[in-house]
Image (cartoon, coloured by chain):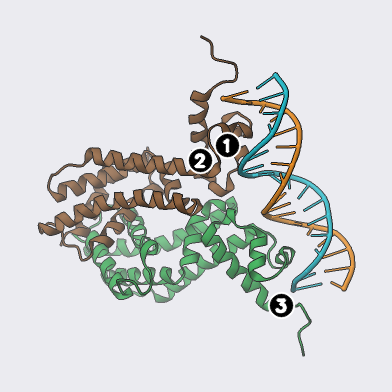
Chain colours: A brown, B green, C orange, D cyan
Amino acid sequence: MARTQGSHSDITGPRIREAALGLFARHGYAAVSMRQIAKEVGVQAGALYNYTPDKQSLLFRLMRDHMQDLLAAYKALEDGGDPQDTLRRFVGFHIRFHLQRPDEVFIAYMELRNLTPDNFAEIEDLRRAYENSLEGILNNGQKVGLFSISDTKIATLAVIAMLNGVMTWYRAGGRLSLDEVEQIYWDMVRRAVTA
Amino acid sequence: MARTQGSHSDITGPRIREAALGLFARHGYAAVSMRQIAKEVGVQAGALYNYTPDKQSLLFRLMRDHMQDLLAAYKALEDGGDPQDTLRRFVGFHIRFHLQRPDEVFIAYMELRNLTPDNFAEIEDLRRAYENSLEGILNNGQKVGLFSISDTKIATLAVIAMLNGVMTWYRAGGRLSLDEVEQIYWDMVRRAVTA
DNA sequence: GTCTATACCAGGATAGAC
DNA sequence: GTCTATCCTGGTATAGAC
């Protein structure tokens, strides 16, 4: 049966999210208008409101979906090996997952201040849950004497901050392969937490 | 001689920059209006244009002044000691300088995308000059065998990214003193670049 | 589900009086 | 140097026809 002319609910929705994702990442949430998003999708601005109640929800859902994907992907990979090995896998996972989604990552931490308080709290909970995964690894390693960390909370934030730096410079096809990047960062992280 | 009524060129200019700084840091450049800035200063929006040709220049000058201050402050502290000692001083300087100017720091790397291409290029040059200072330290230490770094360019970016992470969580009067924070980060940095 | 049209408000910037 | 008033543009969101 042919689809009704002008009816594209199954493809317009995703296309709106993709367009918003790219535009928010490039120009920032506040600088992007609903008309710009609509233009990129190829519909009129009013049509967007069949898919999102407002602009804020568009941003929030992009961020929430990203954080939930991140948590789910990490949970799927988690195992009970020794802490050093688990930390090595965390480093590789973090780098690769984030490099695969540069726009989502950029938005997820540049646009926090443009969330309403309720939405902000929900995203923060997800972010903290992810940080707790890493802190758990560091605590385990510390307990069994593999790591030597004066403050695991700060070390957690320091490691994540360091790894996030990859996003600012890495380009596929550049001087270094992904394996090399992963190796270099793993070396630095390993030494930073080891006596 | 009494100043002409309504004439405040010597204080209004700085007050505009202060207001813009705080508002841009809190809400983002694109989300802040000239009318908001004017309201905080206590003048009408039109009066702002006696001090800045436009909103873009307001942002650019805040960022340029900050980067120039950063470079000048670091140059004043630089010396020719051994690389390990110089690196330790860099870590302390970076943390303290940035924690003293949270708003400037936040803007300087959150609002890069809201600069015109010319302005962006100028800020980027300043940022790179600062990074080069650190890379020089790492290269020196590597040359004399004090450091063991597989890629000094990446190590430079990794160290700066890690140190910048302090800004996201440190609050004066919190659990850790500034000296303790500096010590913890110095330990991690030292180990990360040492075999 | 999408369109056209529009309500309504706020943005940056300027002109001219004081 | 600041004010008031205003121009012009563009923002989010909605109503109602198709």
**Discs 1 and 2 lie in a common subunit:** yes
**Quarter containing the C terminus of chain B:** bottom left
Q: Circle 1: is it few (<14), some (14-19), or many (20+) Cα within 10 Å?
A: many
Q: Chain of mark 3?
A: B
Please report contact status of discs 1 and 2: CB closer than 8 Å, yes or no: yes
Residue D17: quarter of image:
top right
Q: Chain of mark 2?
A: A
**In the rendered image of this protein, does residue B183 appear above or below residue B110?**
below
Rendered location of residue B174, percent (x, y): 34, 71
As helix, strand or loop, the secondary structure at mark 1 comes to helix
Q: State whether residue A194 appears in this view.
A: yes
Which residue has dot 1 on it? A37
**Of the residues shown, which amino acid type is indicated by label 2?**
Leu
Q: CA distance from mark 1 to mark 2?
A: 11 Å
**Of the residues shown, which amino acid type is indicated by label 1?**
Ile
**Of the residues shown, which amino acid type is indicated by label 3?**
His
**In the rendered image of this protein, does residue B52 appear above or below residue A183?**
below
Q: CA distance from mark 1 to mark 3?
A: 44 Å
As helix, strand or loop, the secondary structure at mark 3 comes to loop
Residue A141 is left or right of residue A165, and the answer is left
Q: Which mark is residue A58?
A: 2
